[in-house]
Amino acid sequence: MGGTLATRRIRPALLGLMAVVLATGSNAQQPQQADGEAFRRAQEEFNKVPNTPGDGPYPAIVETDPAFPRHVIYRPADLSPFEGGKLPILVWGNGACVDDGTAHRLHLAEIASYGYLVIAAGGWRSGPGATEPRAPQTARTSGLPPAATTAEDVRAGIDWAVAENTRDGSKLRGKVATGTVAAAGHSCGGLQAIEIASDPRIRTVLVHNSGVFNDGASPIPGIKASKDMLDRIHSPVIYILGGPTDIAYPNGTDDFARLNAVPAVLANLPVGHGGTFSEPMGGAVAHVAVDWLEWQLKGDESAARTFVGENCRLCTGTDWSIERKGL
């Protein structure tokens, strides 16, 4: 990150459409009202955006494993610097819990370019190289759609990475930091990250534009997240929200208020529910996510300055606001 963090200019039209595509049915208290043509246009526009290698020191690639077909993998193209188990793991749940492991591809490639093995639930359905193009979404008049992926699909990424570290013939053999794992997700995928946060292998949790529903059990078929799961989180957690216009804002801020047993950060950038996932290199949100991971999983004290201290990088001179507990 070069010791700096700056918010990037957002393309509002594309971000607004992508917020609808990624978030519909994922964390809203009321059904989204948007026509199918808006969905189609948004998906078409995002599919035109090239895959990027990230701007970190290890240019990233996107790939799939035929032996692990329902997931997409992001990793440094050159694995030679990671001999001896130096590649931390991040598992990812998608917005709307869609089965599209490339729905957040710019964000995830950015993380991978800083030396991470990222595994997202779902097939390669978006962008250049898509092997199973995603069908256009259609508007819903009532209710929330069922989750197409599960928390166990997200957790399976950990199991796969750990197994690859010891499998004969694996390109990842001996390179994975199997004791250094993060769980993350956007919107409905953030709920999946909360669901698996009690896994003892997980060292930190990143919850993007999400939070457990304040009015009781989740109305999303297949999602079991509940407020009592917050008590099972055993590692530092960051909530990254999109400000008061983010439909997850009430839920995420309530979650943060309930977290007292682990170090926690609530970071807000007022861009709404879609975050900056469709921005080049994942935009400002990816910068914050990378700094959090560099601090929590690699002990980088320079990255920690984004979050700690009276003059932390998110504290002054940006559009971000930050609340902190137990750091």
Image: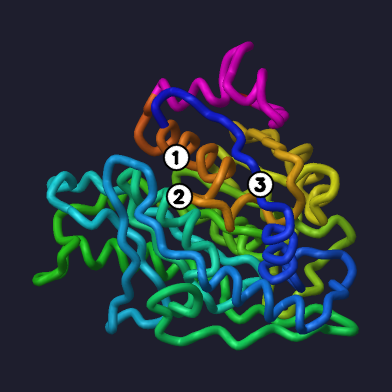
Q: Where is residue 27 in the image (x, y as percent from the top left)?
A: 76, 64
- Report helix, strand or loop for mark 3: loop
Identity, as a three-letter code, of the amino acid under mark 1: Leu
Give the residue number, with chain letter if any, for mark 3.
Answer: 10
Q: Residues within 10 Å of mark 1 (few under 14, many from 20)?
A: many
**Viewer-nearest of discs 3 and 1:** 3
Of 232 and 213, the residue lying toward us: 213
Q: Which mark is residue 284?
A: none
Three-letter code for the amino acid on which mark 3 is drawn: Ile
CA distance for labels 2 and 3: 27 Å
Name the residue: 23% across, 57% down. Answer: 77
Q: Residues within 10 Å of mark 3 (few under 14, many from 20)?
A: some
Of circles 2 and 3, the one toward us is 3
Residue 223 lies, with reference to residue 60, above or below; the image says: below
Secondary structure at badge 2 equals strand
Q: Which residue is drawn at 69% across and 34% down?
A: 260
Image location (x, y in percent) of residue 13: 73, 59
Predominant SS of the magenta segment: loop
Residue 211 rendering spot, x and y as whole percentages = 73, 53
Residue interval drawn in magenta: 301-325
* Residue carrying label 1: 293
Give the quadrant of residue 34: bottom right
Query: Does residue 228 appear in the picture of this structure?
Result: no
Circle 1 — which element? helix
Residue beneath disc 2: 182
